[in-house]
Image (cartoon, helix red, strand yellow):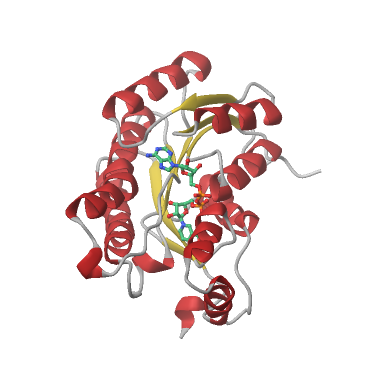
Amino acid sequence: MAEPRLAGKVALITGAASGIGAASARLFAAEGAKLILTDVNEAGAKALAAEIGGGALGFEHDVTSEAAWDMVMAETSVAFGRLDVLVNNAGIGRATPILETSLAQWREVISVNLDAVFLGCRAGIAAMKEKGGSIVNLSSILGLVGSPLTAAYAASKGGVKLMTKTLALEVAQNGWKIRINSVHPGYIDTPMVAGAISRAPDAAQRKAYLISQHPLGRLGRAEEIAAGILYLASDASSFMTGSELVIDGGYTAR
Ligand SMILES: NC(=O)c1ccc[n+]([C@@H]2O[C@H](COP(=O)([O-])OP(=O)(O)OC[C@H]3O[C@@H](n4cnc5c(N)ncnc54)[C@H](O)[C@@H]3O)[C@@H](O)[C@H]2O)c1
C-alpha cells in the first residue's frame, strides 16, 4: 500500500467547519495528517475534530484577529511542537452592486479574505522557517478574471494571488524551505454558493446560469478542491511555489 501522503505532517486548516475546509480536513486525516481545525464557528470546528478523531483539535478562531492567530499558533506548538502545512481557507462571499456597496461591506470582505491571509502567512512563515513546510491560500477564479457584482471579493482574491507569489519569492530568497501556492476554484457546491444561489431573485435560473459558465456542465464538489489542496500540501508538489492551481471545470479556459 502507498504511504499516506501527509504521514507525520501537522496541518492547520482555517474555516474548517464547512465546505472546502471540511472536505480538506477529512482528506488530510485520511492521508495521515495531524490536524488543527479552526473556524469562527467554534462548535463546527470542534465537532469535526471529534468526528475525525486521532488527536485532531478544534478551536474557535476569527482569522481577522491577530490575537486569535497568536493563540492558535501557541496551541499548535504545545500540542504538536511543529507545523508543516497551513491552509488559509476561511473566507466569505458577497455579491452587491457597486452603488449599493458600503465601505463597511467592502472592508469586511477584504478583512476576512485578504488581511487574514496576510496574518496567516506571517504566522505560518514564522512557525515553519526553520524546518520548512507548505502554505496553501484559497483564492478563486475571481482572483483571475472579473465578474459583475463582486468588486470586493475579486479584489480580495486577486490580492491573495499576488501576495502568494510575492511571499513565495521572499521565503525562497531567504533560504527558507517553505512553498506557498494559491488554489483557484470555480463555483463549488458548498454552503457559500448554495446560500448565494438561494438569495438570488430566481434561484433556479441563477444555478443554471452558474452551471452554464463551466464547460464541464456542473458545479464542482468540495472534494475536488480538497484533492488539489492535498497535492500542494504534500511533497508530491515539491517543485511548486508561487503557482496558481486552477480547478474550475474549464471556467477560465475561454
Ligand atoms: N465555494 C466556491 O465556489 C468557492 C470558489 C472559489 C473560492 N472559494 C473559497 O474557498 C474558501 C472556502 O469556501 P467554501 O465554499 O468552503 O465556504 P463555506 O462558507 O462553506 O465555508 C467557509 C468557512 O469559513 C468560516 N469563516 C468565515 N469567516 C471566518 C472568519 N472571520 N474566521 C474564521 N472562519 C471564518 C465559516 O464559518 C465557514 O465555516 C473561501 O476562501 C472561498 O472564498 C470558494
Q: Residue 241, image x and y in percent? A: 40, 54
Q: Nearer the viewer, residue 244 or 152?
A: 152
Residue 216 vertical placement versus 84 (above, below)? below
How many discs mark residues in the rendered view? 0
Q: Is residue 186 above or below residue 168?
A: below
Q: Residue at x 56, y 62 (%)?
A: 188
Please indicate, yes or no, whether residue 209 appears anywhere in the rendered image: yes
Toward the top, the furthest residue is 78
Judged left or right of residue 19, residue 63 is left
Q: Is residue 5 visible to the viewer in this orientation of the structure?
A: no
Q: Give the answer, above or below, for where 56 lies relative to 124.
A: above
Quarter of image, res 127: top left
Measured as percent of width and height from the top left, residue 192 is found at 50, 55
Most distant residue in the left direction: 103
Eyeballing the image, is 246 above or below 212? Answer: above
| Quarter of the image that includes the N terminus | top right
**Residue at the spot x=56%, y=53% of the render?**
191
In percent of width and height, residue 200 lies at 47, 68
